[in-house]
Amino acid sequence: MGSPINDTEPPDYSAKRFRRMMSHAWKLKCPVCGERPMFVPWSQVRSLRDWFMPLDGCPRCGYPFEREPGYFLLSIFAINYGVGALLGVTIYLVLDFCLHLPIWLVLTLTIIPMPIFNVLFARHAKALFLAFDLFCDPHRGEDDGGDRPAESTAPPPKTPDWEPISKS
Ligand SMILES: [Zn+2]
């Protein structure tokens, strides 16, 4: 498992790396090392912010999850809403054209689950977006200064700090 910044080797765009990163993202783990979770564990969530905001960075490899302010906007609009809309349309078509249910029941069964799905899927949308972005745009130290991992010689903590990204 390498650091996101590696100036000596060309970027690895292999399908194997893509699958590995997406697998980590699907499990809500750091896309780089796959060892530590990206979010506060669900059992320790105390607020909506805990649920939606990723941690500052990976406690193990130091990879910063939010590369810049507003970084996760596209993940919400494109992935979360997109997948939700696709799912809603699919449910609607199945209920209306295959099961021939009355329209009030079709709309009820289509509309009510969507917000619930969007809340539950928001973390996955962010994790998948982060992994996809990192796969397509591997970090390089000279590209920009805002996405370097935290430079620390201290060993990673045994119990990670479960604080979501702090907003200034
Ligand atoms: Zn990591």
Image: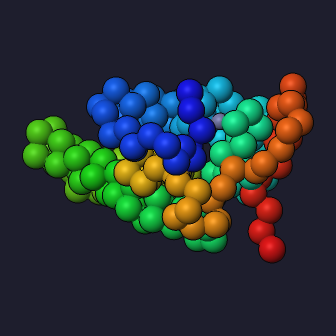
- Quarter placement of the N terminus: top right
Residue 76 in the figure: left or right of residue 163: left
Residue 116 in the figure: left or right of residue 78: right
**Residue for point 76% across, 50% down:** 150
Q: Where is residue 74 in the image (x, y as percent from the top left)?
A: 45, 65
Q: Tell me, what colour scheme is on the image? A: rainbow
Image height check: is 82 above or below 4?
Answer: below
Residue 59 in the figure: left or right of residue 54: right
Q: Position of residue 73 (x, y in %)?
A: 51, 67
Image height check: is 18 above or below 128?
Answer: above
- Quarter placement of the C terminus: bottom right
Q: Where is residue 117 in the image (x, y as percent from the top left)?
A: 47, 47
Q: Which of 23 and 12 is in front in this view?
A: 12
**Residue for point 87% across, 25% down:** 158
Q: Where ligand 1 lies, by image quadrant? A: top right
Quadrant of residue 34 in the image?
Answer: top right
In the rendered image, the residue lying farthest to the front is: 8
In the rendered image, the residue lying farthest to the bottom is: 168
**Residue for point 39% across, 43% down:** 10
- How many callouts does the rendering have? 0
Q: Where is residue 2 in the image (x, y as percent from the top left)?
A: 56, 32
